[in-house]
């Protein structure tokens, strides 16, 4: 594969000779195919449209997509082929944040598909050229020779895109990525994916996020069948219809699938529960590539039939591999899927690295549970300022590292050295070459007793409980550790029935003293595995989950601590009274 610039992924010659449909849009639950020639014509039409708008070389165009579609992918690449720079803005940005983006980039254009975006940001968009992608004409096509003449001036070292991070604190910063940054990541990742041209892939994560965008670029490079299914809410139906071989996801998606299956078995009678408990233990102890053991072999075969086959069925039946990123995946879930014959691999990256840094490989012996994998072939990872256990600050270097933050030289200098090494802001350690993330440096806090607390480490520990769906650990300059908890209501309802607790809506159950006692009993089990200063001494139960819409979750479903702590300030203060 010889792709040096992002738009090189669109080969007009290949598309013109392509007899099959390989891109599919979800139109009201039906997947509409696009033949290669149609894709080529649409791409050329977008280039023609951009030329008609007098797009200058290096001009910045703000796009606000949600989930990927054929239109978004082609328009994105068309802008870059015409010498423009795609400025990616997340759909969840506030008006103030979007205003900063337009002020910094001085962009004339705003591209959207959801008219609500224009309404919500009407003050910011005054004087801008707002273009509904659905209404862009695809009648006129640019001559291939004309496009080649324009695009030949675009160098691999030129800025391809500026992605404004949703951020978990403060004003979003524009990450400048070149064509080379992204395409070196694409080349490295595609070499390691178990995907063939005949395979079907589904896409449902936000296209504004670099994880999904680079993933789609990889799929285009591999020439497989890509189904753009829309938002994650369409996933269950799409899995049954498409029966994909591979997809990328955030851990929350897999955790919900796992918890639903667990809840179904926990609602069964005594024998079913007994068998489920045994099956869960065997799958958690399962170690791939271990020496052949006939008893273990038969146990796993039985479990795949009895329990874990449900995962495969829910995933369409053809699933071979899933790549997970953007947050921590509970090891027992990775093991359960693996025991089911589904290769779930966790990776690690950030917008500033285009995004891939490490991931667990699909080859035997090249993955390790509880880690985010090995560095990509062209990426170096260093742990600096290590403590006695080898834990320290994670630094990375490679051709995938950003140029810097747009118009933020001071911010850039804080994380990117002249030698090309980038501070990730994460804390971790290397385990025989495998990277293990232990926390975000900026999230680590000290209690009033002088003890350091790594909240992510504790959150991951308590989320191993079947009764806890989401949790946020707090205690900065407080006398002890506390937590906001959103329970796993499916499991909690089942436990309530077993304890003869009348069940109503979550809004009232969180106030029920017996429910609070059940949660306290569960916390005691997990607290006992920790030193006293790390134990949760107070908690508040929530009846509503955090969401992207409320601004409490980032675009990749990471909790935004600052926002959540602001929204629950009263409840947090009460835990320390």
Image (spheres, rainbow, N blue to C red):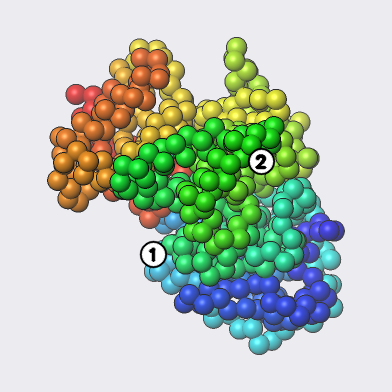
Position of the C terminus, as image quadrant, is top left
Mark seen at residue 264:
none
Q: Could you tell me which residue is drawn at 59 percent across and 53 percent down?
A: 248
Q: Of marks 2 and 1, which one's residue comes earlier in the chain?
A: 1
Residue 234 visible in the displayed image? yes
Judge by depth and name the residue closer to the eye, 341 or 403.
341
289 in relation to 309, above or below:
above
133 in relation to 497, above or below:
below
Query: Image check: 281 left or right of 223?
Result: left
Residue neighbourhood size for the residue with mark 2, other residues' Cα within 10 Å, grouped as few (<14), some (14–19), many (≥20): many
Residue 241: percent from left, percent from top: 53, 70
Q: Could you tell me which residue is drawn at 21 percent across and 44 percent down?
A: 497
Asked if the residue under mark 1 is in contact with the one under mark 2, i.e. CB atoms within 8 Å, the reply is no
Query: Image check: 405 left or right of 264?
Result: right
Judge by depth and name the residue closer to the eye, 187 or 549.
187
C-alpha gap between disc 2 and disc 1: 38 Å
Position of the N terminus, as image quadrant, is bottom right
The kind of secondary structure element at disc 2 is strand
Name the residue carrying label 1.
120
Name the residue carrying label 2.
359
Residue 164: percent from left, percent from top: 55, 51
Query: Image check: 5 left or right of 62?
Result: right
Residue neighbourhood size for the residue with mark 1, other residues' Cα within 10 Å, grouped as few (<14), some (14–19), many (≥20): few
Judge by depth and name the residue closer to the eye, 52 or 135.
135
Q: Could you tell me which residue is drawn at 75 percent across and 69 percent down?
A: 10
Query: Image check: 527 left or right of 300?
Result: left
Q: Could you tell me which residue is drawn at 72 percent across and 66 percent down?
A: 198
Residue 106 visible in the displayed image? no
């Amino acid at each position: 594969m010889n792709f040096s610039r992002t738009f090189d992924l669109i080969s007009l010659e290949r598309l013109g000779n392509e007899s099959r449909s390989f891109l599919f849009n979800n139109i009201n639950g039906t997947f509409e195919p696009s033949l290669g020639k149609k894709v080529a014509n649409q791409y050329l039409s977008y280039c023609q449209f951009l030329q008609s708008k007098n797009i200058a070389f290096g001009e910045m165009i703000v796009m606000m997509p949600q989930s990927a579609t054929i239109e978004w992918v082609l328009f994105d690449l068309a802008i870059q082929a015409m010498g423009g720079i795609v400025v990616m803005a997340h759909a969840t940005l506030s008006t103030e944040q979007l205003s900063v983006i337009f002020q910094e980039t001085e962009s004339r254009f705003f591209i959207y598909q959801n008219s609500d975006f224009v309404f919500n940001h009407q003050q910011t968009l005054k004087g801008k050229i707002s273009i509904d992608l659905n209404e862009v004409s695809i009648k006129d096509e640019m001559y291939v020779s004309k496009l080649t003449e324009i695009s030949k001036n675009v160098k691999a070292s030129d800025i391809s895109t500026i992605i404004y991070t949703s951020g978990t604190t403060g004003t979003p910063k524009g990450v400048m990525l070149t064509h080379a940054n992204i395409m070196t990541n694409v080349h490295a990742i595609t070499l390691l994916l178990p995907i063939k041209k005949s395979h079907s892939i589904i896409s449902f994560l936000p296209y504004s996020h670099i994880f999904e965008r680079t993933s789609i670029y990889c799929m285009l490079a591999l020439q497989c069948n890509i189904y753009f299914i829309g938002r994650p809410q369409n996933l269950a139906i799409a899995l049954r219809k498409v029966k994909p071989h591979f997809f990328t996801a955030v851990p929350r998606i897999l955790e919900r699938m796992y918890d639903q299956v667990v809840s179904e078995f926990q609602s069964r009678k005594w024998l079913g529960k007994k068998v489920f408990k045994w099956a869960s233990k065997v799958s958690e102890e399962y170690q791939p590539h271990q020496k052949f053991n006939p008893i273990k072999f038969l146990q796993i075969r039985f479990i795949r039939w009895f329990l874990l086959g449900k995962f495969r069925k829910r995933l369409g039946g053809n699933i071979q591999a899933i790549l997970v990123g953007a947050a921590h995946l509970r090891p027992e879930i990775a093991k359960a899927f693996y025991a089911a014959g589904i290769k779930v691999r966790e990776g690690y990256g950030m917008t500033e690295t285009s995004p891939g840094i490490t991931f667990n490989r699909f080859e035997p012996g090249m993955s390790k549970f509880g880690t985010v994998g090995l560095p990509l072939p062209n990426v170096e990872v260093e742990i600096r300022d290590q403590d006695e256990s080898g834990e320290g600050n994670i630094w990375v270097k490679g051709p995938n590292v950003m140029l810097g933050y747009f118009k933020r030289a001071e911010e850039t200098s804080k994380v990117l050295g002249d030698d090309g090494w980038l501070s990730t802001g994460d804390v971790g350690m290397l385990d025989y070459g495998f990277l293990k993330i232990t926390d975000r440096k900026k999230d680590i806090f000290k209690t009033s007793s002088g003890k350091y607390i790594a909240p992510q480490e504790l959150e991951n520990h308590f989320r191993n409980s079947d009764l806890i769906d989401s949790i946020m650990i707090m205690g900065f300059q407080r006398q002890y550790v506390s937590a906001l908890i959103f329970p796993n209501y499916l499991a909690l309802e089942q436990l309530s029935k077993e304890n003869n607790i009348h069940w109503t809506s979550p809004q009232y159950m969180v106030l029920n003293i017996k429910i609070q006692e059940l949660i306290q009993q569960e916390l005691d089990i997990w607290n006992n595995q920790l030193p006293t200063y790390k134990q949760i001494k107070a908690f508040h139960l929530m009846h509503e989950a955090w969401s992207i819409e409320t601004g409490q979750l980032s675009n990749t479903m990471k909790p935004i601590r600052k926002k959540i702590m602001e929204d629950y300030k009263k409840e947090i203060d009460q835990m320390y009274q």
